[in-house]
Amino acid sequence: ANSSSPGELYLSAGFLTGTTSDYDAVMFAKHYHADTIFNLTNIDYVYTQDPRKYKNAKPIKKLSWKNYFVQFGTRFKPGMHIPFDPIASKRAMKNGQKVFILNGNDLQNLERCIEGKSFKGTVLS
């Protein structure tokens, strides 16, 4: 979503050597003055714990950047499995960007999210 031209949608994948695809997406969005990033992953929400390991993991629908850093930390380690790279998260917070974490296998859900309708996913802002 582009704040200066509503309705435009850009797709991005990792392209900068030595960075994560999350960071690349944040920088790509900043370059095109986009204030919203849709991060398609293999889970429906950000959870309090890894839902594949912990049955009592609870989905989180909204999370401030501050609380995201409390939950997941601010340091990046290669191979870490967290919803959104902490370095990219710091940059997105600084840029005033909102990140939607959605399951990429459910394109109808993505469409509902883009249209501003009810959806399954987590909003980081």
Image (cartoon, helix red, strand yellow):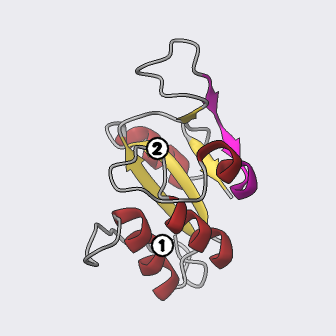
Task: Name above or below for residue 26 compared with residue 117.
Answer: below
The residue shown at (50%, 16%) is 54
* Residue at the top extreme of this rendering: 55
> Tag 1, which secondary structure?
helix
Task: Name above or below for residue 84 compared with residue 58.
Answer: below
Q: How many marks?
A: 2
Disc 1 residue crowd, few under 14, some 14–19, many 20+, Cα 10 Å: many
Tell me, yes or no, whether the two marked residues, 2 and 1, touch with CB atoms within 8 Å: no
> Residue 118: x, y in percent?
61, 38
Q: Which residue is mark 1?
A: 26
Q: Is residue 63 left or right of residue 13?
A: right
* Residue sitting nearer the eye, 119 or 56: 56
The mark nearer the N terminus, 2 or 1, is: 1
The residue shown at (65%, 42%) is 71
> Residue 88: x, y in percent?
50, 67
The amino acid beneath tag 2 is: Leu
Q: Is residue 80 magenta?
A: no
The C terminus - image quarter? bottom right
> Tag 2, which secondary structure?
strand
> Residue 62: x, y in percent?
69, 43
Q: Which residues are magenta?
A: 58-67
The amino acid beneath tag 1 is: Val
Q: Which residue is mark 2?
A: 102
* Residue sitting nearer the eye, 88 or 45: 88
Q: Is residue 62 magenta?
A: yes
C-alpha span from label 2 to label 1: 16 Å
Q: Is residue 17 left or right of residue 77?
A: left
Task: Name above or below for residue 103 compared with residue 79.
Answer: above
